[in-house]
Image (spheres, grey):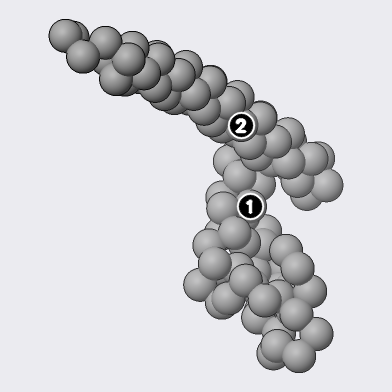
Amino acid sequence: MNSGDDSPPIVVTIFGDRYRIRTDRGEAYTRACAEYVDDAIQRAHVAGVAEPQRAAILAALEITDELLQARREVEQLTDAVESRVTEVTERLESIAGDPSA
């Protein structure tokens, strides 16, 4: 999150601790991010991790895994779209070059 120096701080609670965050991302977005992180830490904690720091690290790993999978999916979709655009472009060029097609 970017630091919004002039923006008022947004207070969020993550795993029972309150944090004052200055950001230019907006309150709703910041709260959604904090809730997502809190949920991930709570899941790790419920799974048997007692120490908050360990729960936070496991949550960070889970969130990073989700991020990397999403990036991989976006890359695959981008490649598929680029390939399809190339196919369509070549087909249109062949039709434009052949008046009988």
Q: CA distance from mark 1 to mark 2?
A: 19 Å
2 w.r.t. 9: above or below: above
For the residue carrying disc 1, how many other residues have a C-alpha within 10 Å: few (<14), some (14-19), or many (20+)? many
In the visual, does 52 lie left or right of 73? right
Q: Residue at x 71, y 75 (%)?
A: 23
Q: Furthest-left residue in view? A: 100
Q: Position of residue 47 (x, y in %)?
A: 61, 33
Quadrant in which the N terminus is drawn: bottom right
Q: What x and y, as percent, mark residue 16?
A: 67, 65
Q: Is residue 20 visible?
A: no
| Image marks 1 and 2: residues in contact by CB distance under 8 Å | no
Residue 68 percent across, percent down from the top left: 66, 30
Could you say whether the residue bearing mark 1 is in a helix, strand or loop?
Answer: helix
For marks 1 and 2, the one nearer the N-term is 1
Q: In the rendered image, which residue does mark 2 sit on?
A: 71
Residue that appears at 52% across and 27% down: 78
Indicate the quadrant where residue 72 lies: top right
Q: Amino acid at mark 1?
A: Val
**Quarter of image, res 21:** bottom right
Is 98 displayed left or right of 89 in the figure?
left
Q: Position of residue 63 (x, y in %)?
A: 65, 39
Q: Is residue 26 left or right of residue 3?
A: left
The 10 Å Cα crowd at callout 2, few under 14, some 14 to 19, many 20 or more, is: few
Please tell me whether mark 1 or mark 2 is closer to you in this view: 2
Question: Type of residue at label 2?
Answer: Arg
Residue under the point 79% across and 74% down? 3
- Residue 90 shown left or right of residue 5 in the figure: left
Q: Is residue 45 above or below residue 68?
A: below
Residue 37's tag is 1
Q: For this rendering, which residue is in front, 12 or 65?
A: 65
